[in-house]
């Protein structure tokens, strides 16, 4: 056992092992699931119903030793060249960096930050003007911390529906909602709701690091691209993911979002887009 900076002990396995457990990109896929001693994972990814090009989202889950996971989603910026290349490069760089960090015995928090920096370098190295969002939730035993760049988002929900964590999108409407200038429901219909102010691949990229949150048994973590959050209200999402099998929850979220993309109704949000999501529930 090796002491960490905060006095905890890190096992030798933690220092030498990081494996990709699930990866979703380009092709429609899911729901895919993985059951682990610490909890269950489900994920899916669907291409925008209105386009013929590749899915510009990418998502993956990796282990980090025996009692830690990293969940990540990336959404290639629409309107910029080869968004799918940016999201794929970011996720691959993150995965590779986590493997190196685990082998070197690096603490999870530092490993994730190193991975985000590696993703930034990889996307900039494409030299094609592309960019991507990147949102990560790192789970270690019964604690979770979120790291994000852009407007892909994360929620943590208790079994009774209590919202324990919600990230703030890096966008004009996201900041307006946080400041109390705009209602969250109204933001879904705002003319500037598609603008994003922070990207991997932007030379001024900044990483927002959340506080550590202690998870309770049966808490559910959701990490998803805006294809989900631009089509469903938060209370709808919370009600679906708070209990029941998470693979069924993933299917239900995707079906509802896709229905609204394809058959918009004036009183409900609708924005056709690629959609990728990951769910984790603590055992």
Image (spheres, rainbow, N blue to C red):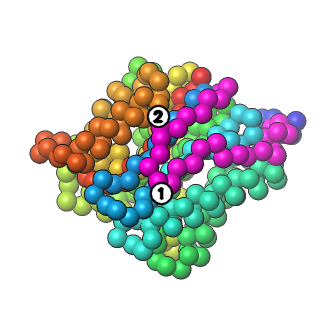
> Which residue of the protein is positioned furthest toward the left in this rendering?
266
Task: Return the mark for residue 249.
Answer: none
Mark 2 Cα-neighbour bin, 10 Å: few <14, some 14–19, many ≥20: many
Location of residue 125 (image quadrant): bottom right
**Of callouts 1 and 2, which one flags the residue occurring earlier in the amino acid sequence?**
1
Mark 2, residue position: 156
Q: In this view, does 270 lie to the left or right of 88?
A: left
Q: What is the x, y in percent for residue 211?
A: 55, 42
Q: What is the x, y in percent for residue 275?
A: 39, 49
Confirm whether residue 46 shows in the render: yes
Confirm whether residue 226 shows in the render: no
Q: In the rendered image, which quarter contains the N terminus?
A: top right
Q: What stretch is highlighted in magenta?
A: 10-38
Q: Does residue 240 belong to the magenta stretch?
A: no
Q: Does residue 20 belong to the magenta stretch?
A: yes
Mark 1, residue position: 26
Mark 1 Cα-neighbour bin, 10 Å: few <14, some 14–19, many ≥20: some
Residue in the picture at 25% in, 41% down: 259
Q: What is the x, y in percent for residue 243?
A: 43, 22
């Amino acid at each position: 056992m090796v002491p960490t900076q905060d006095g905890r002990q890190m096992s030798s396995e933690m220092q030498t092992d990081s494996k990709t457990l699930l990866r979703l990109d380009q092709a429609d896929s899911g729901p895919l699931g993985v059951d682990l001693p610490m909890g269950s994972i489900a994920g899916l990814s669907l291409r925008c119903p209105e386009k013929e090009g590749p899915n510009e989202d990418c998502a993956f889950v990796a282990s980090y030793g025996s009692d830690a996971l990293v969940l990540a989603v990336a959404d290639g910026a629409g309107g910029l060249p080869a968004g799918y290349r940016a999201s794929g490069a970011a996720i691959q760089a993150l995965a590779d960096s986590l493997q190196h960090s685990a082998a070197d015995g690096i603490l999870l928090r530092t490993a994730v930050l190193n991975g985000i920096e590696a993703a930034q370098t990889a996307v900039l190295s494409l030299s094609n003007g592309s960019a991507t969002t990147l949102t990560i939730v790192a789970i270690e035993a019964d604690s979770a911390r979120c790291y994000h760049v852009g407007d892909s988002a994360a929620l943590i929900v208790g079994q009774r529906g209590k919202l324990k964590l919600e990230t703030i999108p890096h966008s004009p409407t996201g900041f307006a909602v946080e400041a109390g200038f705009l209602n969250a429901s109204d933001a879904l219909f705002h003319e500037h709701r598609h603008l994003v102010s922070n990207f991997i691949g932007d030379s001024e990229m900044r990483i927002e690091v959340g506080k550590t949150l202690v998870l309770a048994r049966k808490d559910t973590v959701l990490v998803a691209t805006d294809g989900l959050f631009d089509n469903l209200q938060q209370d709808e999402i919370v009600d679906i993911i708070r209990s029941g099998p998470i693979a069924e929850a993933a299917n239900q979220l995707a079906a509802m979002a896709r229905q609204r993309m394809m058959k918009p109704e004036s009183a409900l949000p609708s924005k056709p887009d690629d959609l990728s999501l990951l769910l984790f529930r603590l055992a």
